[in-house]
């Protein structure tokens, strides 16, 4: 079983069901994924089932114009797409993306021992980012047999990526480039992301490694030896058979876009998504 259990349970309205309780660690360090380059963190049950359902409802009922259809996948961007790596529409994130995820994320110190200048304020993962918090969310939908090609996230963002998974589980693959720069097609690690979990990747994982999701119907060969975050899963018994049958998984990817246009606040509604 995973490590959820005895640490601080928090959340606006914890229910009697244990799966719908959030279970925040005292620091991210307590949920660092072992064996990965520094640093990646996995927090199972970061949001409750009720919060998951509320966010899924907002995603599903967003205006049609919010969805961008790619060849195999559709996505939403909040508050808007980037133009030349710049956030032009700099409206704040809507409440349903801000609460509970951002507030909760910023409440967790990276390390028990690290403190900012104000000694009473522990440092969170965005403490040194330009805006001190994520200002952009990408929402991706992955039905079974859908994935995303191995890629790096590039220069538009501060190198911290926070991904909340909703609806279903799947494996994220992490790849390294070969010496000649070509992609080594065999993933070096796999991270299994359960619904309601938070995955944070930073550092070398952002700059030096690629990440992608296989377009498959079933993740196979799942075990403590093949899944980097096995010891941190909320319910590893669900994968004891070694497989995960994919269902529709929605991901919320929170990042801080480095460049925000001052022009944004002056743009009229026709330049803004609904
Ligand atoms: O959906 C995910 O978990 C990955 C998304 C991703 O790779 C990206 O937005 O760059």
Image (cartoon, rainbow, N blue to C red):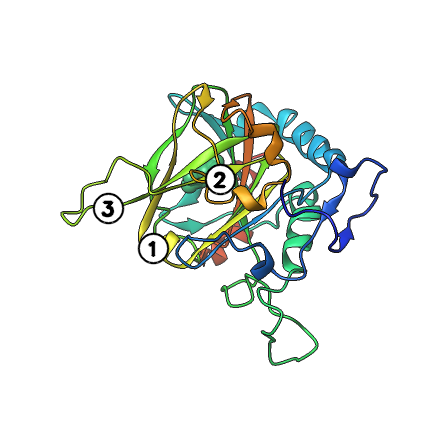
Q: Are marks 1 and 2 in contact (CB under 8 Å)?
A: no
Pick whichever of labels 3 and 2 is earlier in the sequence. 3
Residue 102 location (% of width, % of height) = 64, 52
Residue appearing at x 38%, y 28% in the figure:
214
Residue on which disc 1 sits = 207
Which circle, 1 or 2, is nearer the viewer? Answer: 2
Q: Callout 2: few (<14), some (14-19), or many (20+) C-alpha neighbours within 10 Å?
A: few
Alpha carbons under labels 1 and 2: distance apart: 26 Å
191 or 53: nearer the viewer: 191
Please name whichever residue, 266 or 66, is drawn nearer the observer in this view of the structure: 66
Number of residues whose C-alpha sits closer than 10 Å to that of mark 3, classed few (under 14), some (14–19) or many (20 or more): few
The residue that disc 2 covers is 224
Element at badge 1?
helix
Residue under pointer 3: 177
Q: Please identify the quarter of the rendering in which residue 175 is found.
A: top left
Q: Position of residue 205 (x, y in %)?
A: 38, 52
Q: Give the quarter of the figure containing the C terminus.
A: top right
Dot 2: what SS?
loop
3D distance between C-alphas at marks 3 and 1: 11 Å
Going by the image, does 223 lie left or right of 188?
A: right
Point out residue 268 in the picture as x, y percentages from the top left corner: 55, 43
Which quadrant, please, contains the N terminus? top right
Q: Residues within 10 Å of mark 1 (few under 14, many from 20)?
A: few
């Amino acid at each position: 079983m995973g490590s959820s259990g005895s640490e601080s349970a928090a959340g606006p309205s914890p229910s009697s069901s244990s799966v719908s309780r959030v279970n925040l660690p005292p620091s991210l360090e307590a949920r660092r994924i072992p064996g990965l380059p520094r640093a990646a963190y996995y927090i199972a049950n970061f949001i409750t089932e009720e919060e998951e359902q509320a966010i899924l409802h907002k995603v599903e009922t967003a205006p049609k114009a919010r969805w961008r259809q790619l060849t195999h996948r559709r996505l939403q961007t909040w508050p808007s797409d980037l133009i030349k790596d710049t956030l032009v529409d700099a409206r704040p994130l809507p409440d349903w993306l801000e609460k509970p995820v951002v507030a909760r994320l910023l409440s967790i110190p990276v390390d028990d021992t690290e403190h900012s200048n104000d000694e009473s304020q522990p440092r969170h993962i965005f403490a040194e980012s330009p805006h001190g918090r994520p200002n952009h969310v990408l929402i991706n939908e992955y039905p079974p047999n859908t994935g995303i090609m191995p890629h790096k996230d590039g220069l538009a963002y501060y190198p911290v990526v926070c991904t909340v998974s909703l609806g279903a589980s799947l494996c994220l693959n992490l790849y390294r480039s070969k010496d000649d720069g070509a992609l080594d097609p065999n993933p070096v690690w796999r991270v299994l992301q359960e619904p309601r979990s938070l995955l944070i990747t930073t550092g070398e994982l952002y700059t030096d490694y690629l990440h992608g999701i296989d377009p498959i119907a079933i993740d196979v060969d799942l075990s403590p030896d093949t899944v980097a975050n096995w010891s941190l899963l909320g319910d590893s018994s669900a994968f004891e058979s070694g497989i995960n049958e994919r269902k529709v998984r929605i991901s919320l990817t929170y990042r801080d876009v480095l460049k925000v246009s001052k022009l944004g606040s002056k743009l009229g509604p026709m330049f803004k998504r609904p």
